[in-house]
Amino acid sequence: MFIIRLAHRYLTTFGSYLMLMGRTFSIPERMRMFAKRYVKEMSQLGINSIGIVLLISFFIGAVICIQMKVNIQSPWMPHWVTGYVTREIMLLEFSSSIMCLILSGKVGSNIASELGTMRVTQQIDALDIMGVNSASYLILPKILGLVTIMPFLVIFSSTLGVIGAYATAFVGHMMSPEDLTSGMHHAFNEWFVWMSIIKSLFFAFIISSVSSYFGYTVEGGSVEVGTASTNGVVCSSVLILFSDVFLTELLS
């Protein structure tokens, strides 16, 4: 019985999510207002996240370079191995998957708490009473804004990771910049960049839509808003991990 109830609960939630997305992806009633909210959400969700992306990507790139040099480099391996492995890790997994997992905590909680607060203070109900499609008006700019800005954050993250690796070469003298550059150039596959961008588009949609669902459908007061925010982040993170497996297999 427990399994049946659990399956019924998840299927009900998934059905409610699909119905909400059906309401969300409708033609905006006022394009000028939609454009303003779209630009605002890109700034709030994406540009305001540049700081955390900068810090994490720079230091992770530096740490990966140090770990590769200390633990993998040996007389039996070419000197460019450290740069090559650092580039592959940053491109294939960190800048797309791990960075999106980190952003799901910041951006996802932001979206869920904002919509949840609007729900419990009856602002969403007021929009519905006025005949406005509140789901499209509030959620669609968030989804499109994050999906638009996420590829730029991924490219920015990869670039900063490489800069962090070069910082260890110049400042820490872990290896020569020439060897690091040789590894960065070795067997470069342009498709890996596109694969990282494609994955980030899916992850951005998951973060924005799932967090919006939990915030939009919250019931109760301020305590439930916090719970919805937590549920949105956890569910987004799990879905990102699952979809990462399938997308990596599909795109590789």
Image (spheres, grey):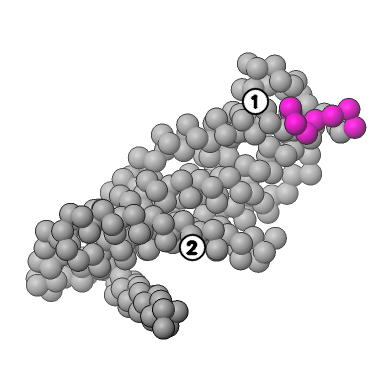
Tell me where residue 73 appears, x and y as whole percent: 80, 30
Residue 145, can we see it? no
Tell me where residue 115 appears, x and y as whole percent: 23, 58
Residue 93, can we see it? yes
Please tell me in which quadrant of the rendered image residue 169 appears.
top right
Question: Gap between marks 2 and 1, in whole Å?
Answer: 34 Å
Decide whether residue 75 is among the magenta residues: yes
Three-letter residue code for mark 1: Tyr
Q: Are marks 2 and 1 in contact (CB under 8 Å)?
A: no
Of pointers 2 and 1, the one earlier in the residue sequence: 1
User: What residue lies at 41% left-to-right and 34% top-to-bottom?
Assistant: 51
Query: Quadrant where the N terminus lies?
Result: bottom left
User: What residue lies at 67% left-to-right and 64% top-to-bottom?
Assistant: 249
Please tell me in which quadrant of the rendered image residue 75 appears.
top right
Q: Give the residue number, with chain letter if any, for mark 1.
A: 166
- In the rendered image of this protein, does residue 207 appear above or below residue 24? above
Three-letter residue code for mark 2: Leu
Query: Which label was assigned to residue 239?
Result: 2
Tell me where residue 7 appears, x and y as whole percent: 43, 79
What element does badge 1 sit on?
Answer: helix
Decide whether residue 238 is among the magenta residues: no
Magenta stretch mostly in which secondary structure? loop
Mark 1 closeness class: few <14, some 14–19, many ≥20 residues within 10 Å: many
Mark 2 or mark 1, whichever is nearer to me: 2
Query: Quadrant where the C terminus lies?
Result: bottom right
- In the rendered image of this protein, does residue 43 appear above or below residue 22? above
> Which stretch did the figure color magenta?
69-76
Tell me where residue 82 appears, x and y as whole percent: 75, 33
